[in-house]
Image: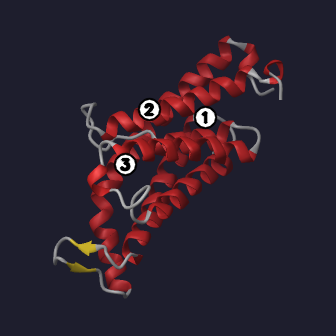
Amino acid sequence: MSIKQIQPRFIVLLLFIVAGGILRVTAAGNLTPFSNFSPLGAMALFGGAMFADKWKSYLFPLLALFLSDVIMMKTVYAAYADGFLFEGWYWNYIGFAAMVLIGQLVIRDVKVIPVLGGAVLSAVLYWLIVDFGTWMRPTSIDITTGLPFSRDFSGLVKCYALGLPFIKNTLISNVVYCGIFFGLFSWLENRIPALSAR
């Protein structure tokens, strides 16, 4: 692909994904006033909804997630690094890919209801997948007992219950960053015809 063949829409979409990755790293370092307030979900939903090629909607957001993870594991969270990334990283990536899929399936039109629905649904699905992965890991500890989670339904429910407080920031940040990403891109599309997919 030559430089002349690269579409302005693609470049701008890619810049939004890169910005999401940068914002994620700064939020992880508590350099913003909102601890754990991350554009992770919005980045996945935006990529899933906006890239015309399905492979791009997975590749670029996942690449931004990976690069931001590597940076955070080498700097902010170096004490928690387990090898190259962190223990159980693949559950995080499965949850992230599921959010991209929700962006593809739910946000077919950039309107308030589909974007809001995608933001809420992706937060819940991400919590279910990632906390299931936490429960599956034998090294995961129930902070209320100091013991590993029991390998039964009650242990899984306990793990989900302990993860509930964390879904709040995921949900709020999904809604806020989706509003910013989708709103800003729609505003740009209306003013720059070359950015339109049509």
Tag 1, which secondary structure? Answer: loop
Quarter of the picture containing the C terminus is: top right
* Residue 108, quarter of picture: top right
Q: What type is the residue that disc 2 sits on?
A: Ile
Say which residue label 2 marks. 22
Q: Is residue 180 visible?
A: yes
Residue 61 in the image, given as x and y percentages of width and height:
58, 42
Residue 4 in the image, given as x and y percentages of width and height:
82, 18
Q: Is residue 144 left or right of residue 132?
A: left
10 Å crowding of disc 1: few (<14), some (14-19), many (20+):
few
Tag 2, which secondary structure? Answer: helix
Quarter of the picture containing the N terminus is: top right
Is the residue under label 3 in contact with that under label 1 (CB below 8 Å)? no
Say which residue label 3 marks. 73
Q: Of marks 1 and 3, which one's residue comes earlier in the chain? A: 3
* Residue 49, quarter of picture: top right
Say which residue label 1 marks. 111
Label 1 and label 3: CA atoms lie apart by 36 Å
**Label 2 vs label 1, nearer the camera:** 2
Q: Of marks 2 and 1, which one's residue comes earlier in the chain? A: 2
